[in-house]
Amino acid sequence: MLLKTIISVSALVLFAFAGEAATTPTYTAQTTTLQPALPGALQGVGIDQRLNQSIPLNLVFKDELGRAVPLSTYFHGKPVLLALVYYRCPMLCTRILNGVVDSLNTISFTPGKDFEVLSVSFDPKDTPELAAAKKKTYLASYKRAGPQNGWHFLTGDSASIKALTEAVGFHYKYDPATQQFAHASGIMLLTPNGRLSRYFYGVEYKPRDVRLGLVEASNNKIGNAVDEVLLFCYHYDAATGKYGAVAMNAERVGGAAFLLLAGSCLLLLWRRERRTSRQTLRRAG
């Protein structure tokens, strides 16, 4: 009896842990995160939520055709989904954009018609040619017609990039040794007049939450702060296809949390079974 109960509860705990790990936190979820200690290279890297703050719409970037355009070009009565990435990123930025297109493929709203999508590179070395190649890739992944004029891939100089990233609370670092950026993953929703309305962390964005966020942003509503569950892109090893110590530490912390939870459940069950056995023996005596 005890063995069957232990196996059942262990399976239940494992299922719950796996389900939680596979779910990307959004503004509707309340989460508690066990964060490993970050190495020095990641100190100061992250995303601060600056809800209701306006971004400078006069900043000038280049679109995928190389044309200089102010950000105000994309704020004209519609909400805006903003993804800060860099186009030569070896892994995480691709997953961010994959998460965006997966969500857009599910919701009923159409980029260009109902809202705008801005993918802005924070690497001043990225070029309009790289931006155009990225746009071609993601337009091919979008399952419906219409986003050609609604999903924009921008590049810019250091001054414009710094002003935009500081305005939205996006902090990152460049590592000359690896020629990569340390950065966190997430996207933002902005109102038609350029105020920050919602933050979504991670690399997967629930379509229902994105849709509701777009509806709120279109009505100039500002959401609540969400818990930060951050993924960091740093020292990705293309040869092994793995991340460095930070990701491994996060996995160890998650594994330790599961073992602690499972062990606690098993201990409680054992104590309960022991009390039941003693009570049975007393009644029999």
Image: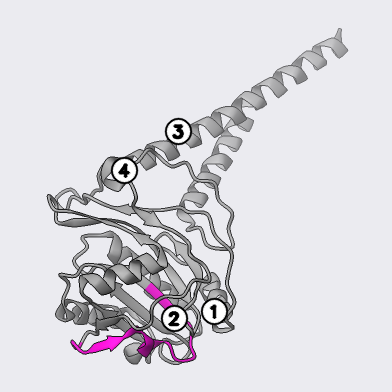
| Above-or-below relation of 233 to 15 | below
Mark 1 or 3: in front is 1
Q: Earlier in the sequence, mark 1 or mark 3?
A: 1
**81 magenta-colored:** yes
Residue 24 image position (x, y, % from top left) = 47, 58
Amino acid, disc 4:
Val
Amino acid, disc 1:
Ala
Task: Write down the residue under mark 2.
Answer: 80
Mark 1 neighbour density, 10 Å: few (under 14) some (14–19) many (20 or more): many
Task: Write down the residue under mark 1.
Answer: 217
Label 1's element? Answer: helix
Task: Write down the residue under mark 3.
Answer: 256
Q: Earlier in the sequence, mark 4 or mark 3?
A: 4
Mark 3 neighbour density, 10 Å: few (under 14) some (14–19) many (20 or more): few
Q: Earlier in the sequence, mark 2 or mark 4?
A: 2
Report the span colored magenta. 65-82
Q: Earlier in the sequence, mark 3 or mark 2?
A: 2
Label 3's element? Answer: helix
